[in-house]
DNA sequence: CGTCACACCTGGCCGC
DNA sequence: TGCGGCCAGGTGTGAC
């Protein structure tokens, strides 16, 4: 479910309820998500103050005052929601416990942070803050698409010689971290590049043009509060709105939105996943 | 190393 | 109403 814009939306929603607050207790309702939780997770969280909530790619990182960092990944179906009106800005009371509420954090400001994940592809881990970058899941990531290290010359260099479709190259988190199926489709549409084109056979000028386009798609989506298809909710339970602005994702059979193009959005399967594009204007 | 099929899960939807 | 098949926003692993 969540790509970078959704994770950033969740982070922004959680921050006012978590930053500066102390975890009074951590309810762990099952022993694992994708992997077993770290040893003694509930005890290590209890009494810790959250100093800062950060994001790296699709991971949320909570730096604790004890020198440890909690890593959270939402997988495909994970939700992190706030209830309890900690700052007088959330209108709802604590909802009844739901199926798949795997972890609940009770904060000293009255907030309750609930991690719900039906498919359990999500993950949590704890590590020393000063070794966070070296964590197995983080050390393999490429640059942040909204950061300075992701620039035209970089992407041109990374695409050079790659024989894989550009769709797969942009989904490769080692090249650029945080894109997923939706935003790759949307960015390729805006760049008018076919998802089938081999990454190494796109002109340098067109690869370079992808960089600001990727940044803009992500910014537009963050501004809209992410995309809500099935599971995604913002931290306050609200829907995101970017799904209404998809140009190609999920629009199979519908007309291409490009001015003067009479193409039809088509769905193909690449490495087991749907790609949506207009075969007419994406080349 | 690059590339790819597969695995891990639950649930919603569609057609019969 | 029930059931099988298909689909879903991610990503680590193992095989070539």
Image: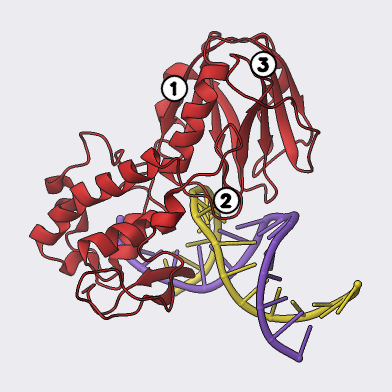
Chain colours: A red, B purple, C yellow
Disc nearest the viewer among 1 and 2: 2
Residue A107: image x %, image y %?
A: 67, 14
Q: Residues within 10 Å of mark 3 (few under 14, many from 20)?
A: some
Secondary structure of residue under mark 2: loop
Q: Nearer the viewer, residue C13 or A260?
A: A260
Left or right of C13: which side holds B8?
Answer: right
Residue A140, visible in the rendered structure: no
Residue A100 visible from this viewpoint: yes
Rendered-image quadrant of the C terminus of chain A: bottom left
Q: Which of the chains bears the disc numbered 2?
A: A
The one nearer the camera, C13 or C3, is C3
Q: Toward the viewer: C9 or A204?
A: C9
Mark on residue A76?
A: 2
Rendered image: mark on residue A131:
1
- Say which label, 3 or 1, has the lower sequence index: 3
Q: Position of residue A101 (x, y in %)?
A: 74, 37
Marks 3 and 2: which is nearer the front?
2
On screen, residue A200 versus residue A131, left or right, reads left
In the picture of the structure, the residue carrying the numbered disc 3 is A44
Under tag 1, what secondary structure? helix
Left or right: where does residue A206 sit relative to residue A35?
A: left
Total number of numbered discs in the rendering: 3
- Chain bearing mark 3: A
- Same chain for mark 1 and mark 2? The answer is yes
Mark 3 vs mark 1, CA separation in Å: 17 Å
Q: Position of residue A56 (x, y in %)?
A: 41, 33
Q: Are marks 3 and 2 on the same chain?
A: yes
């Amino acid at each position: 479910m969540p790509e970078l814009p959704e994770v950033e939306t969740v982070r922004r929603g959680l921050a006012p309820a978590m930053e500066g607050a102390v975890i009074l207790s951590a309810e762990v309702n099952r022993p694992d998500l994708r992997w077993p939780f770290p040893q003694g997770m509930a005890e290590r969280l209890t009494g810790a103050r959250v100093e800062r909530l950060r994001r790296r790619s699709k991971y949320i990182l909570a730096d604790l005052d004890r020198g440890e960092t909690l890593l959270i990944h939402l997988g495909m179906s994970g939700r992190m929601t706030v209830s309890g009106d900690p700052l007088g800005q959330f209108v709802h009371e604590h909802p009844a416990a739901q199926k798949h509420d795997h972890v609940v954090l009770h904060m000293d400001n009255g907030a309750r942070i609930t991690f719900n994940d039906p498919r359990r592809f999500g993950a949590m881990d704890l590590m020393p803050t000063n070794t966070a970058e070296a964590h197995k899941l983080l050390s393999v990531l490429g640059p942040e698409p909204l950061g300075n290290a992701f620039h035209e010359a970089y992407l041109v260099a990374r695409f050079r010689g790659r024989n894989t479709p550009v769709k797969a190259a942009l989904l490769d988190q080692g090249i650029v971290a945080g894109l997923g199926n939706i935003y790759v489709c949307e960015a390729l549409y805006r760049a008018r590049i076919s998802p089938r084109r081999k990454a190494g056979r796109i002109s340098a000028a067109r690869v370079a043009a992808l960089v600001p386009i990727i940044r803009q798609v992500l910014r537009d989506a963050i501004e809209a509060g992410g995309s809500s298809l099935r599971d995604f909710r913002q931290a306050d339970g609200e829907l995101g709105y970017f799904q209404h602005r998809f140009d190609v994702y999920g629009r199979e059979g519908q007309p291409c939105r490009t001015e003067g193009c009479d193409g039809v959005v088509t769905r193909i399967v690449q490495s087991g996943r749907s790609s949506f594009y207009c075969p007419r204007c994406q080349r």
